[in-house]
Amino acid sequence: MYRPAAKDQLRILAAGLGTPFYTSDSAPRGIAMEAHSRAKLENWDTLVVDTAGRLQIDLELMDELEQLKSALQPAEILYVADAMSGQEAVHVAEAFHARLGVTG
Protein backbone atom coordinates (compact mmCIF):
# COMPACT_ATOMS: atom_id res chain seq x y z
CA MET A 1 0.00 0.00 0.00
CA TYR A 2 2.73 2.43 0.90
CA ARG A 3 5.58 1.51 -1.45
CA PRO A 4 5.28 2.27 -5.16
CA ALA A 5 4.71 -0.88 -7.24
CA ALA A 6 4.47 -3.14 -4.15
CA LYS A 7 1.19 -4.62 -5.34
CA ASP A 8 2.61 -5.24 -8.81
CA GLN A 9 5.68 -6.91 -7.34
CA LEU A 10 3.55 -9.24 -5.20
CA ARG A 11 1.21 -9.99 -8.11
CA ILE A 12 4.18 -11.02 -10.29
CA LEU A 13 5.68 -13.12 -7.49
CA ALA A 14 2.37 -14.90 -6.87
CA ALA A 15 1.88 -15.57 -10.59
CA GLY A 16 5.35 -17.07 -10.80
CA LEU A 17 4.48 -19.39 -7.92
CA GLY A 18 1.09 -20.24 -9.39
CA THR A 19 -0.70 -19.02 -6.29
CA PRO A 20 -3.72 -16.72 -6.04
CA PHE A 21 -3.17 -13.05 -5.26
CA TYR A 22 -5.70 -10.59 -3.88
CA THR A 23 -5.66 -6.83 -3.55
CA SER A 24 -8.08 -3.94 -3.81
CA ASP A 25 -8.13 -0.18 -3.42
CA SER A 26 -9.35 -0.46 0.17
CA ALA A 27 -7.34 0.57 3.21
CA PRO A 28 -4.90 -2.10 4.48
CA ARG A 29 -7.35 -3.54 7.04
CA GLY A 30 -10.05 -3.69 4.37
CA ILE A 31 -7.78 -5.52 1.94
CA ALA A 32 -6.83 -8.04 4.61
CA MET A 33 -10.46 -8.66 5.61
CA GLU A 34 -11.56 -8.99 1.97
CA ALA A 35 -8.73 -11.45 1.30
CA HIS A 36 -9.65 -13.38 4.44
CA SER A 37 -13.26 -13.66 3.29
CA ARG A 38 -12.16 -14.79 -0.17
CA ALA A 39 -9.81 -17.37 1.36
CA LYS A 40 -12.72 -18.82 3.34
CA LEU A 41 -15.03 -18.85 0.30
CA GLU A 42 -12.44 -20.60 -1.85
CA ASN A 43 -11.35 -23.01 0.91
CA TRP A 44 -7.72 -21.88 0.93
CA ASP A 45 -5.82 -23.40 3.82
CA THR A 46 -3.27 -20.58 4.05
CA LEU A 47 -3.50 -16.81 3.73
CA VAL A 48 -0.32 -14.74 3.76
CA VAL A 49 -0.79 -11.07 4.55
CA ASP A 50 2.26 -9.04 3.56
CA THR A 51 2.32 -5.99 5.79
CA ALA A 52 5.31 -4.36 4.12
CA GLY A 53 8.48 -3.04 5.65
CA ARG A 54 7.95 -1.01 8.78
CA LEU A 55 9.87 -0.04 11.86
CA GLN A 56 8.85 -0.23 15.48
CA ILE A 57 9.32 3.53 15.79
CA ASP A 58 6.44 4.19 13.36
CA LEU A 59 3.63 4.02 15.90
CA GLU A 60 0.85 4.53 13.36
CA LEU A 61 1.96 1.54 11.31
CA MET A 62 2.46 -0.56 14.45
CA ASP A 63 -1.09 0.32 15.53
CA GLU A 64 -2.23 -0.84 12.09
CA LEU A 65 -0.53 -4.21 12.70
CA GLU A 66 -2.28 -4.59 16.03
CA GLN A 67 -5.61 -3.88 14.33
CA LEU A 68 -4.86 -6.50 11.67
CA LYS A 69 -3.94 -9.04 14.33
CA SER A 70 -7.17 -8.38 16.18
CA ALA A 71 -9.30 -8.60 13.04
CA LEU A 72 -7.64 -11.64 11.46
CA GLN A 73 -6.56 -13.59 14.55
CA PRO A 74 -3.68 -15.24 12.69
CA ALA A 75 -2.26 -18.63 13.65
CA GLU A 76 1.27 -17.35 12.98
CA ILE A 77 2.95 -13.95 12.96
CA LEU A 78 6.30 -14.05 11.23
CA TYR A 79 8.88 -11.30 11.37
CA VAL A 80 11.08 -11.16 8.25
CA ALA A 81 14.31 -9.24 8.68
CA ASP A 82 16.36 -7.69 5.92
CA ALA A 83 19.97 -8.88 6.11
CA MET A 84 21.10 -5.27 5.80
CA SER A 85 19.45 -4.52 9.16
CA GLY A 86 22.36 -6.14 10.95
CA GLN A 87 22.19 -6.25 14.74
CA GLU A 88 19.35 -3.72 14.73
CA ALA A 89 17.12 -6.57 13.51
CA VAL A 90 17.27 -8.02 17.04
CA HIS A 91 15.90 -4.81 18.58
CA VAL A 92 13.22 -4.48 15.92
CA ALA A 93 12.16 -8.11 16.34
CA GLU A 94 11.95 -7.66 20.11
CA ALA A 95 9.75 -4.59 19.70
CA PHE A 96 7.49 -6.41 17.23
CA HIS A 97 7.24 -9.37 19.59
CA ALA A 98 6.31 -7.13 22.51
CA ARG A 99 3.43 -5.59 20.52
CA LEU A 100 2.28 -8.54 18.42
CA GLY A 101 3.52 -11.80 19.91
CA VAL A 102 5.70 -12.86 16.99
CA THR A 103 5.72 -16.65 16.54
CA GLY A 104 8.64 -16.91 14.16
Image: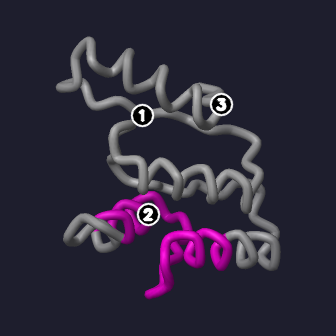
Residue at 65 percent across and 30 percent down: it is 101
Residue 52 x %, y %: 37, 53
Mark identifier at residue 14: 2
Residue 40 x %, y %: 81, 71
- The amino acid beneath tag 2 is Ala
Residue under circle 3? 101
Asked whether residue 46 is drawn in magenta, I would say no
User: Would you identify the image quadrant in which residue 49 lies?
Assistant: bottom right
Relative vertical location of residue 37 with respect to residue 17 in this rendering, above or below: below
Q: Residues within 10 Å of mark 2 (few under 14, many from 20)?
A: some
Quadrant of the image for the N terminus?
Answer: bottom left
Residue at 52 percent across and 53 percent down: it is 63
**CB within 8 Å, label 3 to label 1:** no
Residue at 61 percent across and 30 percent down: it is 102
Helix, strand or loop under label 1: loop
Mark identifier at residue 42: none
Could you tell me how far apart the alpha carbons at marks 2 and 1 are, in whole angstroms?
A: 18 Å
- The amino acid beneath tag 3 is Gly
Mark identifier at residue 80: 1
Could you tell me how far apart the alpha carbons at marks 2 and 3 are, in whole angstroms?
A: 27 Å
Q: Nearer the viewer, mark 2 or mark 3?
A: 3
Q: Residues within 10 Å of mark 1 (few under 14, many from 20)?
A: few
User: Would you identify the image quadrant in which residue 70 lies?
Assistant: bottom right
Q: Nearer the viewer, mark 2 or mark 1?
A: 1
Helix, strand or loop under label 2: helix
Quadrant of the image for the C terminus?
Answer: top right
Q: Earlier in the sequence, mark 3 or mark 1?
A: 1
